[in-house]
Image (cartoon, coloured by chain):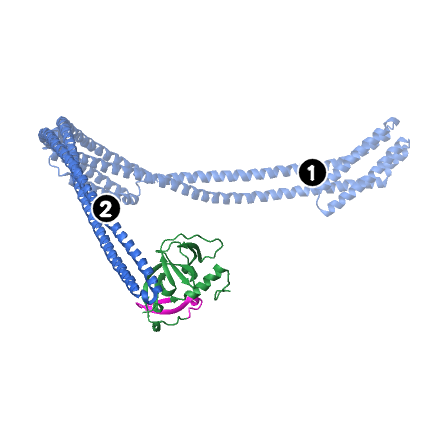
Chain colours: A blue, B green
Amino acid sequence: MRNWSFSKKVVLVGCIFAATLLAVSVAGLTGFVRLEKSISQFADGFETNQLISKLESYPKEIRMLEAQAIIEPSADQYNTYIKQMNEIFSNWDKAISHSAEKVQGEIQKKNIAELQRKVEKRKELSERLIKAAFESDNDLAFGRLRDDEAGKNLEDKIDALSGELGNVERQAATLLKREAIHLGKSWLYWLALTTLVGTAVGLMLSQSILSGLTRNLNRIAEQFADTLQRMSISSHEIAAAGLVLTQNSTTQVTSLEDACAAIERLVTTVNVHAENAKQASNLAASGTEHAQNTKEILDKLTLTLKDLNQQNNETKLKYKEIPLELQAIFNIIRAWADKIKVIQDFSFQTKILSLNASAEAARAGTQGRGFANIADEIGHLHQNSTKAARELSQELDECIRQAEAIVQSVQMKLETLAAQGLDKLESGNLLASQCSQALTEVAGKASHLSSVTLGMSHAYENQSDGVAEISKTISKLAWDTRQGIAGAQECASTAHELSSQLDGLHSVGKQLVTLVKGSGLQPKRTRQSADENDDANTHVDVDLHTPTTSVEPAVPILMEPAAEAPSESPSPQRGKTVFKGRFKKAAGAEDMSFSNDDVDLS
Amino acid sequence: MTIENRFLMFTVAKERYAIALSAFREVVVEADITPVPFAPDSILGIMSVRGQMISVFDLRTRLGLQRTEKPVETSLLILESRGERLAMSVDSVENVFEVPLEQLTAPPAFRTSHLNFFAEAVTQSDRQFIVILNSEKLFSFEESFVTGGKVPLPGVA
């Protein structure tokens, strides 16, 4: 019982509490219901008793009233008597009808109806009696009162019926009592049953709620322990990383010093470059001068070419005079052609003449035959001369055509020659101008180059300054890095401190787990794990300090944290493996859920 | 060699025609032709040759060809028949030639051509046909206009 887990204890307490609460509540509820029922029944019984007593009292009241009416029949009280009587009877009637409501049996109902009829009769009797009494007929009244059989019977009957009614009520009360006893017994059984059932239900309910609660609690405890373990590992890793950082920083310092040396060499190179740039600038300036000189020479060449062009144009003009001279020759030839036309005209005239002569000769008959011959001859002459003139004309035409062709060809050739000369001159001019332009560009570019190289040399000087600055900065950086190494070592030692503290915290976490889960179940195992935990702690101590000793020769600033470290410890890699091994063992020793989480770590 | 077998050759619309030398009087190259009002297209007008008024007709139009405004070399042939004279405009006068009468052949039927009416014979020279025109028929046709007589054109209603 004492070694029960927290959850079980809580469950037990919860069960007891729930059962008690249930029993009390059930008992209270049932008792309340029963009490209410009894009270209502009691009220009913009380009312019935009252009713019975009333029913029994009404006949007495009537008799008393009748007696009073006989004894003192004063005239002025007659109405009062009648009124009182009516009142009594109406009350009686009310009581009867009221009891009729309560009664359930068929016989009882019949009895009540009879009772009502009897009471009606009794009322009539009473009225008559009171009337007789006030008519001073006392005898009759007394007689009536005393001897009336009917009245007496009626009274008896009324009494009997009332008694019967009372009996009925009494019987009902007895029944009620018996019923109540029976009910009380059944209630006892019922109470026992509900208590049992309620306890069982309460147990189940509280079990389910509390098991959920404890599960969460367990998980939190496990996570807490787990996180602690992880933190412990992380802190060890930080320590290792700090060592690595220290090493890296040392290497960095060396690199930075190398960089310093390289930059100094760079400064030298930059200075050389600046000198070279200056020389280039000078060269560019001389280039510009040369270009200017060449340009002047080219300008002179252009002028010469222009002169040449002018001379060519003059020659062209002279050539144009040649066709004019040729034209003169043409004119002469044309004059010849005109003359030939005259000859042709003559020839035509001759033809006409010969024809007319032929006609005249024909008219002359045989005598005109000789003349006709002459006319024919003349006709022949015309034909010959026409032929000759035509040939001449043809030859002249040919001549003109050839001359024109010559003139045209000469003109064409001259023009081609002139055009060619002009073209060549123009191309020469163009080339010269292009050359001049190109040289101008060259000069411009050379001057630009000069300025650029000048700028370059300035830039190189600036660069030299800049590089010197960089060199300084890097030296400072090296210094800062050395400082950084010291910081990293401090960090490593702090991480170590942290890891040992975390180990302590881890054992606390385990205790918490034991507390939450209960140690009674696995007492032996817990003790084993605790032993191993101690072993692991000692391991951690040893492993953490080892890397610092390995860095020691590289950086002298590391001496302080290194002093704590035992010198016999192995390398940081081994330290890590030891950690893992410990956790594996611990996982084997721990609870089921615990080991599941530890698989991820390894 | 008689006058009967001598002919004067001339051209109209590049075709060669001829007329008997006996009907031919002379050639006039330049002349002032006065147009006659209300005369038919073929009548060019009248002209004076050595004091004698003669009417001039255009052979080209007479043969049913298109009348040209300016012929290349217009010559006027003066024809004479029974003391009457008539001038005929042709494109050019060529020459006088002689043909034996047996070499003349009857003209073929020119069908609807006006030539059918005026042609007398056909001869050949230098592989070209020469149509010899009947001067009498030319005269009789022209006289109908000049004298007012009516000679109906063949084939023309």
Query: Mark 2 is on which residue type?
Result: Asn
What's the chain of the residue with tag 2? A
Q: Estimate the x, y position of residue A31 in percent, counting from the top left.
A: 55, 38
Q: Residue at x 66, y 41 (%)?
A: A173
Q: Residue A331 got which mark?
A: 2
Query: Mark 1 is on which residue type?
Result: Thr
Can the viewer see residue A560? no
> Outermost residue toward the front?
A367
Residue B120 magenta = yes
Which residue corresponds to mark 1? A48
Spatial CA distance of label 2 from label 1 is 183 Å
Residue A35 magenta = no
Specify whether A295 is left or right of B46: left
Q: Which quadrant of the view contains residue A10?
A: top left
Q: Residue at x 46, y 40 (%)?
A: A19
Specify whether A396 is left or right of A275: right
> Outermost residue toward the bottom?
B102
Q: Is label 1 in a helix, a strand or a loop?
A: helix
Specify whether B32 is left or right of A476: right
Q: Estimate the x, y position of residue A565 in percent, counting from the top left.
A: 13, 33
**In the image, which residues are magenta?**
B109-131
